[in-house]
Amino acid sequence: MIGAAALALVVAISLMLIRTLKGPSLYDRVLAVNSIGTKIVLLLGVMGFLLGRPAFLDISVLYALINFVATIAILKFFRYRSFQVSLSRRQSRGPK
């Protein structure tokens, strides 16, 4: 039963990979890459359960954090074309 879940996750990852390659817009591709990362986290958890290795759960949590930070960084880069936003682009809130 759990082997079927792992196989279903592999199929879902391959479908998201197709969406990543054929996505109509940049944001669709970023969303597909984020979905691939989420499904890999699930696959790591399932594989850890199948193999009886609970350390896989620690690896999957670390991978989820890296996936989240990378997605935010990619979206920020495509919005500002830089990882640093200049002071002139920030909106001032006036004196405190």
Image (spheres, rainbow, N blue to C red):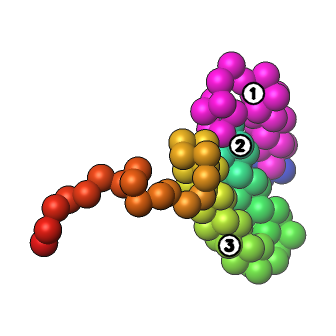
Q: Amino acid at mark 3?
A: Leu
- Dominant secondary structure (helix, strand or loop) of the stretch shown in magenta: helix
Q: Percent position (x, y) of residue 55?
A: 76, 80
Provide the secondary structure element on which disc 1 rests.
helix
For residue 12, side relative to residue 38 (left or right): right
Query: Where, by quadrant of the figure, is residue 11 drawn?
Result: top right
Give the residue at x 81% y 35%.
Answer: 17
Q: Percent position (x, y) of residue 10?
A: 83, 42
- Of pointers 1 and 2, the one earlier in the residue sequence: 1
Q: Is residue 32 above or below residue 46?
A: above
Provide the secondary structure element on which disc 3 rests.
helix
Residue 35 in view, yes or no: no
Q: Is residue 52 above or below residue 41?
A: below
Q: Amino acid at mark 1?
A: Arg
User: Would you name the residue on which mark 1 appears?
Assistant: 19
User: Would you name the residue on which mark 2 appears?
Assistant: 33
Q: CA distance from mark 1 to mark 2?
A: 9 Å
Mark 2: few/some/many CA within 10 Å (<14, 14-19, 20+): many
Q: Amino acid at mark 2?
A: Val
Mark 3: few/some/many CA within 10 Å (<14, 14-19, 20+): few
Give the residue at x 72% y 24%.
Answer: 23
Quadrant of the snapshot with the C terminus: bottom left
User: Would you name the residue on which mark 3 appears?
Assistant: 62
Q: Which residues are magenta?
A: 6-31
Q: Percent position (x, y) of residue 86?
A: 47, 58
